[in-house]
Amino acid sequence: MTKKKLFLVLLAGLLLCNIVLLAVMLSNDRPPRHGPRAVVIERLHLDKDQIASYDELIVVHRNKVLEKEKVLKALKNELFNLLSEKHNDNAPDSLASQIGKTQTDIEQIHYSHFLEIKQMCVEEQMDEFHELVKELAGLFRPLPRKKAKK
């Protein structure tokens, strides 16, 4: 086989692969997911009024979480600043307890947020809500971190 024929066969194969990939992507009826908001809307089949209410809940939820995350960051900074100074032996334990309490507060904010979403659902959406609840921890986990270079 000459180089020209080999090149044409490879080119045809790549073209065919692209056409198949494009066909698969276009045949997918589901819209692409763009984060937790889209997942909740899609899974619960929220109507326009529910989406508007949900968007309001999201704003309140984000503000509450951001406020607690600021406190959490300040506490962590205070804890690690103890490493560079002579300190009271109880100070790290006290700060660690405050950090734990703040993280607990954040989890309670998340829980309350989903209680509010549940209250927003109508009876026909409750089965979907209960299915979503089973997956919440996996759906809303932090993004995976990149591995450190050696």
Image: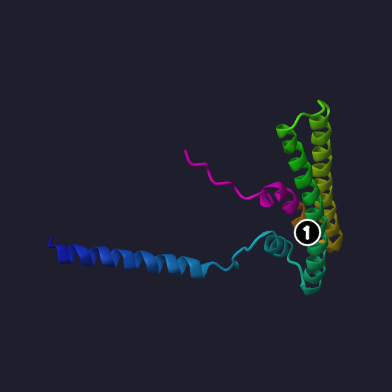
What residue is drawn where x is 75% and y is 50%? 133
Is 32 positioned to the left or the right of 11 in the image? right
Classify residue 43 as left or right of residue 53: left
Which residue occupies the extreme front position in the image?
85
Q: Residue furthest bottom?
A: 48
Camera-side residue of 103 and 99: 99
Question: Which is more toward the observer, 81 or 10?
Answer: 81
Provide residue 9's location: percent of width, then percent of height.
Answer: 23, 64
- Dividing the picture into quadrants, the one containing residue 52 is bottom right
Is 84 on the left or on the right of 57, as rendered?
Answer: left
Q: Position of residue 53 (x, y in %)?
A: 82, 68
Q: Position of residue 78 (x, y in %)?
A: 77, 40
Q: Nearer the viewer, residue 33 or 91?
A: 91
Residue at left offset 40%, top offset 66%: 20
**Colour convention of the picture:** rainbow
Q: Secondary structure at mark 1?
A: helix
Image quadrant holding the N terminus, namely bottom left
Residue at the disc numbered 1: 62
Q: Is residue 102 magenta?
A: no
Magenta stretch prevailing secondary structure: loop
Q: Write the start and end of the magenta stretch as one range.
A: 131-150
**Relative height, residue 98 to residue 54 (above, below):** above
